[in-house]
Image: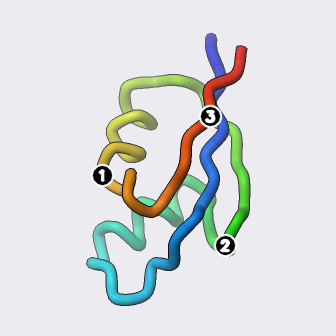
Amino acid sequence: MAKIKVKKVKSAINRTQTQKRILESLGLRKMNQVVEHDDTPSILGMINKVQHLVSVEGTK
């Protein structure tokens, strides 16, 4: 299965509680932190909800 790298590039201050929880469930707590996840529909759905706060890089 393909892997993707997700990097937090913007702060979660003044964001909704839902967006803060999504970032936490992705494992993103600090700025510029990078985590690697499998390319699954549930992960892509979470990324889509906070796409303005993160950057995504696909890897193989």
Residue furthest to the bottom in view is 14
Amino acid type of the residue tagged 1 in the rendering: Lys
Amino acid type of the residue tagged 2 in the rendering: Met
User: 1 above or below 36?
Assistant: above
Whole-Å distance between the Cαs marked 3 and 1? 16 Å
Where residue 51 appears, x then y in whole percent?
38, 51
Could you tell whether 2 is left or right of 50 in the image?
A: right
Circle 1 crowding by C-alpha within 10 Å: few under 14, some 14–19, many from 20: some
Circle 1 sits in a helix, a strand or a loop, which is it?
helix
Quadrant location, the C terminus: top right
Quadrant location, the N terminus: top right
Judging by the rendered image, the residue that carries numbered circle 1 is 49
Where residue 59 appears, x then y in whole percent?
70, 22
Give the mark nearer the N terminus: 3 vs 1: 1
User: 51 above or below 22?
Assistant: above
Name the residue: 38% across, 59% down: 52
Q: For residue 17, what is the image quadrant?
A: bottom left
Where residue 42 appears, x then y in whole percent?
38, 33
Amino acid type of the residue tagged 3 in the rendering: Glu
Q: For residue 36, what is the image quadrant?
A: top right
Give the mark nearer the N terminus: 3 vs 2: 2
Circle 2 crowding by C-alpha within 10 Å: few under 14, some 14–19, many from 20: some
Where residue 21 appears, x then y in whole percent?
41, 68
Name the residue: 53% across, 23% down: 39
Judging by the rendered image, the residue that carries numbered circle 2 is 31
Judging by the rendered image, the residue that carries numbered circle 3 is 57
Marks 3 and 1 close (CB-CB < 8 Å): no
Marks 1 and 2 close (CB-CB < 8 Å): no
